[in-house]
Image (cartoon, grey):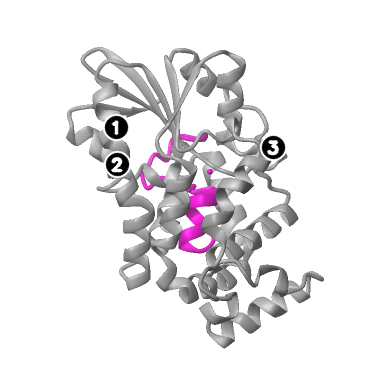
Amino acid sequence: MNILPRISQLIIITLLIALSFKSYAAPALFKIEKNGVNSYLFGTVHVGDASMQGLPKYVTDAIDKSEQVVVEVDISKLTPLQMQQRSMPFMLLKNGKTLQSELSQQNYTKLKDYFAKKSIDIAMFNGLKPWAVMVSMMQIEFQNAGFSDKTGIDKQILTYAKSNNIKIAELETLEQQLQMFDAMALLSNEMIAETFQQLADIDGYFIKLVDAWKNGDMDTLTHYYHTSFDDSNYGEISEQVMLINRNNKWLAQLAPRLAHERLFIAVGALHLPEKHGLIQQLQAKGFTVTRL
């Protein structure tokens, strides 16, 4: 389904690629090689603006050379109704809990004021888990800034693959993605507090990151990676749940296939860097990974 709070970085944009290639001026595409078999790894952005409509030719060329496109979740096979039906059980609070009971009074009051300024009654969200409310806030702010998942790179890749009869595989289910948010439930107050902090500067914490992704500015992306996943308790837990655990599971699926299949792997770009990222882990397994 990947820059604001640490959690939203993954599910909504996941832009960060912590490598330094100053000579490039385009989103990073990597070639994976082993035993004469070539595949591709592409870090994606889950929302985009009008300027991001249309995949670069070097990306579509790589897709054309591949036997299968592999994504996090193949949302193209789900209707909006199916998405809602499968998501709601994970988003709803249970056992008499309410949004107000799950948050500090300070955070709940800030949320109430936030929605009131947008003429939205917070009662609409009273049965939702804090992370689901956070996602709603992100959608509102992204839309206001001119961004939509319709021009997100993931969706464009899926559309291109389907229109060219290229098979599509997914690394996890929608339910698995939603379950990881429940693993962060004890950090709900920290998540909401940071969301407000980052939304106070949407340009600095989101639009500049999109620009960095567009231009291949890896130094800027590296900076935001390290500020997002710091050595605080929140930073370490969110990195473990949202990135490390998932990367390890994905690699267990991908490594055997990459030895004999030509794949185009498109995942949130935050999954690529650092010692737990897909690039270094693939290299540790004997694959040559080269930026094109």
At label 3, the amino acid type is Ser
Where in the figure is residue 290, as x and y percent of width and height?
32, 28
Q: Which residues are magenta?
A: 1-29
How far apart marks 2 and 1 lie (CA) works out to 7 Å
Q: Which mark is residue 206?
A: none
Question: Is mark 2 in CB contact (under 8 Å) with mark 1?
Answer: yes
Q: Is residue 93 above or below residue 141?
A: below
Q: Which residue is mark 1?
A: 253
In the picture, measured across the screen, residue 55 lies left or right of residue 179, that is right
Q: Which is the main secondary structure of the residues drawn in magenta? A: loop
Whichever of callouts 3 and 1 sits on the residue coming sooner in the sequence is 3
Question: Is mark 2 in CB contact (under 8 Å) with mark 3?
Answer: no
Where in the figure is residue 273, as x and y percent of width and height?
34, 45
Q: Residues within 10 Å of mark 2 (few under 14, many from 20)?
A: few
Q: Which residue is mark 2?
A: 249
Q: Is residue 16 visible?
A: no
At label 2, the amino acid type is Lys
Where in the figure is residue 152, as x and y percent of width and height?
61, 39
How far apart marks 2 and 3 lie (CA) works out to 34 Å
Viewer-proximal residue among 27 and 77: 77
Q: Is residue 215 above or below residue 117?
A: above
Whichever of callouts 2 and 3 sits on the residue coming sooner in the sequence is 3
SS for tag 2?
A: helix
Which residue is drawn at the image coordinates 27% and 43% (left, top)? 248
Give yes or no for residue 189 being in the magenta stretch.
Answer: no
Q: Residues within 10 Å of mark 1 (few under 14, many from 20)?
A: few
Which residue is drawn at the image coordinates 59% and 59% (left, top)? 135
Q: Which residue is mark 3?
A: 51
Which residue is drawn at the image coordinates 66% and 55% (left, top)? 139
